[in-house]
Amino acid sequence: MKRAVITGGAGFIGSYLCERLLKEGMSVICLDNLLTGKLSNIEHLTGNGNFEFMKHNVCEHITIEGPLDYILHFASPASPIDYLQYPIHTLKVGALGTHNALGLAKEKNAAFLLASTSEVYGDPLVHPQSEDYWGNVNPIGPRGVYDEAKRFAEAMVMAYHHTHRLNTKIVRIFNTFGPRMRRNDGRAVPTFINQALAGKDITVFGDGLQTRSFCFIDDLVEGIFRLLISGLNTPVNIGNPDEYTVKGMAELIIEMSGSSSRIIFEPLPVDDPKVRQPDISRAKECLGWFPRVSTRDGIAATIEYFKKQR
């Protein structure tokens, strides 16, 4: 039986990966300090004999007994509301946490997958963004703590790959949504849905014409799994190239939820990207992956989830 560690495994994406690897017949160890993760995301897995939860801060040394085949490093605050509240921890988990997780992978000769982000492209000057674009990031702006933590983590992963011949993968995750997102997550989709269901004004920053590409969680997990078991060591964009303006997404959620909410506009945050769309050519060619769930279907499923949480 293959054995995997998932750091940040009680988080939104991490919990789905725990499920997926268990379904693939693996034994899964979930590491999370529960800073932004939730035990409720994984409580349905606790009766599985092949699943183990360990409360642990990966910025401290990681000790796991026995062999390991895979390490998936997903520990990090990932939404602006989180990394602005925990800026130093975000930097530390990107640096110290990644170093500790890579050290464990080296000790166990395990394949290593880093959860990176489209934020490494910053406020891009190239559209859409392919993996060979180096980005346009402000290192001292408020978003820099997350952007640069992930850029540093990518550099460290590649250093371990070249220096220690470690089998490493880097997934650059574009905006992802779905059930299990936190109500107070701060990202567009859960915020808009909860405002719409409550009949409150929907808050859009700037003029709302900035664009994002929204990928449903099921598609993301499929792409990550294909990358994990592939022989690919270069970064791979995983996201849905179906591009929406932020205002357009707010309008879609109002329509699909049957809400009477109206859209109001507030000042755009510093360094907020004007465009964001993945070039997924590498994922298509090397992994045979592309998103299959339409944005409308994904939004419908997410609205139903949040209705049950009210």
Image (tube, helix red, strand yellow):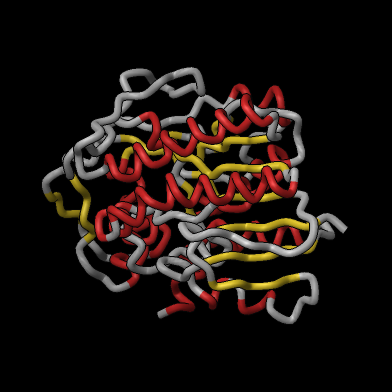
Q: Residue at x 27, y 31 (%)?
A: 274
Q: Quadrant of the N terminus?
A: bottom right
Q: Is residue 295 left or right of residue 95?
A: right
x and y, in percent, of residue 21 in the image: 74, 57
Q: Is residue 89 left or right of residue 130?
A: left
x and y, in percent, of residue 68 in the image: 76, 54
x and y, in percent, of residue 164 in the image: 66, 31
* Residue 283, visible in the rendered structure: no
Q: Specify the quadrant of the image occupied by residue 186.
A: bottom left
- Camera-side residue: 124 or 204? 124
Q: Specify the quadrant of the image occupied by residue 157.
A: top right
In this rendering, the answer to whether 230 lies above or below 220 is above
Q: Quadrant of the C terminus?
A: bottom left
In this rendering, the answer to whether 263 lies above or below 173 is below
In this rendering, the answer to whether 168 lies above or below 71 is above
Q: Is residue 143 left or right of residue 25?
A: left
Q: Residue at x 17, y 44 (%)?
A: 269
All told, the count of numbered labels is 0
* Residue 91, visible in the rendered structure: yes
Q: Residue at x 84, y 60 (%)?
A: 25
In this rendering, the answer to whether 40 lies above or below 173 is below
Q: Residue furthest left?
A: 267
- Camera-side residue: 66 or 218? 66
x and y, in percent, of residue 189 in the image: 38, 55
Q: Residue at x 29, y 29 (%)?
A: 137
